[in-house]
């Protein structure tokens, strides 16, 4: 479904995309109207694939009433979360589907301009995306009076600022406005005062591609896949100690063990899994004892875990948990924008204590302090970066306490 076009056309082959049924979702949206789009998204159960898992139909419905002023839509292609690379595959292997999804999103918000906010490290794809946009314009799928509907909409590609925090919706907008990429206060929300203080709707690349697919095939067809309330499929990027690291489309509901063994070809050198990290470096560590958990939003939430961006990093039995959390914290130490104290100072405290754990000079009380500071970061940081930066460490304390305590000096 979502990856059905991978490998079937190149970025400059719009006719092939159309032959594959491309732009059918957009036509359906035009023909059946905005309420139909909302209804279909609701049936599909689509949750935002950028990590926060907010129901897409609710986000899009909320924007329907704000039509009196100029509005903007954004495709968040910042994809800065380590171990996450599924949006890169969509952008490079099915760019027209992303363009189609963003155009549907623009139609829903009566926007005239859409922006693909492209991760700085993906600049090599900018020319391909701009070519695909130009060809879409030539064929009447972008520009003035799209397909004779009277709807005017165009897309530009904006190169990201090269900072992880710029994937956060409001920091992204700040950087688009030419300011330092730091998050804004949550009120007013960007849905009512976003880019240039105008209503703005921002969605992840995959969310937009899934929305276009649902409108193409119908929500009930999409809902034939999945498990319980986690309807449909998910693009996952799997990496680490597996034999076949790659992006895969999987139905919700298979277990973590099946993903590793049947999808990703098992653990390298026949070693055992020690832990996974779900959703990128800000996600939880999951011990091997939980491998039979189903990959659904609900099953993972029940265990205080989560799908996040869809990244799955596999660490084998040789991986040191302390070395791993050091790497994870180094990332946040580097990427914290410094705006708020809990995150700015918290990652620094973490760095010092993790170094002590590595040097075997930590006390047991240092681990208590990791818990205390991590909880504070989680509860009081200004944005999602600081709120999740302690997650790998907190889960390491929960699931690998013995390993952390080994070598402490009291
Ligand atoms: C530090 C940080 C980085 C983020 N990076 C991304 C990103 O690269 N891509 C993305 O789609 N969402 C990212 N998000 C989540 C977005 O803020 C937002 O929830 C998402 O783009 C909304 O789209 P969706 O509803 O389609 O998921 C990030 C959030 C935080 C806090
Ligand atoms: S939580 Fe971190 S990244 Fe977010 S605003 Fe505070 S310092 Fe900046």
Image: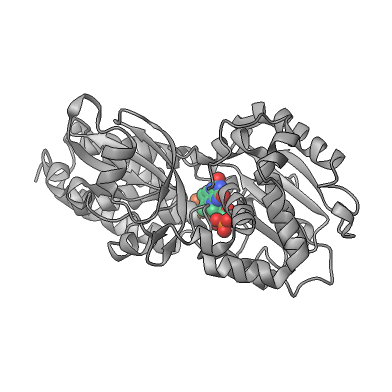
x 72%, y 49%: residue: 23
Render colour scheme:
one colour
Is any atom of residue 73 visible in this view?
no
Nearest to the observer: residue 300 or residue 104: 104
User: Which picture quadrant has residue 327?
Assistant: top left
Percent coordinates x, y for residue 359 in the rendering: 20, 32
Residue 268 visible from this viewpoint: yes
With 41 as the anchor, is 53 left or right in this view? left
Compared with 102, 314 (above or below) is above
Q: Is residue 200 left or right of residue 138?
A: left
Which residue is at 40% across, 51% downward?
251
Outermost residue on the front side: it is 19
Identify the residue at image location x=40%, y=57%. 377
Nearer to me, 70 or 17? 17
State how many labels appear: 0
- As displayed, is residue 304 above or below residue 162? below
Q: Position of residue 290 (x, y in %)?
A: 21, 52
Residue 318 position in % (x across, y down):
19, 30
**Vertical relation: 198 (above or below) 275:** below
* Left or right for 359, reference 156: left
Q: Is residue 83 above or below residue 394?
A: above
> Which residue ends up furthest to the bottom in the rendered image?
65
Q: Residue at x 75, y 44 (%)?
A: 178
Please provide percent x and percent y for residue 330: 39, 36
Query: Is 365 in front, or is 35?
Result: 35
């Amino acid at each position: 479904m979502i990856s059905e076009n991978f490998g079937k056309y190149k970025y400059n082959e719009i006719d092939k995309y159309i032959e594959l049924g491309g732009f059918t979702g957009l036509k359906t949206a035009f023909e059946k109207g905005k309420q139909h789009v909302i209804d279909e998204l609701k049936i599909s159960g689509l949750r935002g694939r950028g990590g926060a898992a907010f129901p897409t139909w609710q986000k899009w419905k909320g924007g329907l009433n704000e039509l009196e002023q100029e509005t903007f839509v954004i495709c968040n292609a910042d994809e800065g979360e380590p171990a996450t690379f599924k949006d890169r595959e969509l952008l490079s292997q099915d760019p027209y589907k992303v363009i189609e999804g963003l155009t549907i999103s623009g139609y829903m918000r009566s926007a005239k301009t859409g922006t693909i906010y492209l991760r700085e490290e993906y600049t090599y794809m900018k020319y391909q995306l701009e070519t695909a946009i130009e060809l879409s314009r030539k064929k009447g799928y972008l520009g003035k009076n799209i397909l004779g509907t009277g709807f005017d909409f165009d897309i530009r590609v904006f190169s990201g600022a090269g900072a992880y925090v710029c994937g956060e919706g409001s920091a992204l907008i700040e950087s688009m406005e030419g300011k330092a990429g730091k998050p804004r206060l949550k009120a007013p929300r960007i849905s009512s005062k976003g880019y240039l203080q105008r209503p703005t709707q921002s969605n992840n690349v995959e969310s937009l591609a899934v929305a276009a697919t649902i409108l193409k095939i119908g929500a009930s067809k999409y809902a034939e896949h999945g498990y319980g309330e986690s309807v449909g499929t998910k693009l996952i990027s799997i990496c680490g100690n597996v034999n076949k690291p790659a992006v895969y489309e999987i139905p919700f509901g298979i277990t973590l063990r099946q993903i590793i063994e049947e999808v990703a070809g098992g653990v390298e050198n026949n070693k055992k899994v020690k832990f996974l990290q779900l959703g990128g470096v800000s996600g939880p560590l999951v011990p091997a004892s939980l491998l039979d958990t189903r990959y659904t939003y609900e099953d993972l939430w029940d265990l205080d875990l989560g799908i996040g961006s869809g990244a799955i990093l596999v660490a084998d039995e040789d991986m040191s948990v302390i070395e791993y959390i050091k790497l994870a914290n180094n990332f946040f130490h580097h990427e914290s924008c410094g705006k708020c104290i809990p995150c700015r100072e918290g990652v620094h405290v973490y760095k010092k204590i993790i170094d002590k754990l590595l040097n075997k000079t930590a006390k047991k009380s240092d681990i208590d302090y990791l818990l205390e500071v991590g909880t504070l970061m989680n509860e009081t940081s200004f944005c999602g970066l600081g709120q999740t930066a302690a997650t790998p460490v907190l889960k390491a304390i929960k699931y690998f306490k013995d390993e952390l305590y080994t070598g402490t000096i009291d």
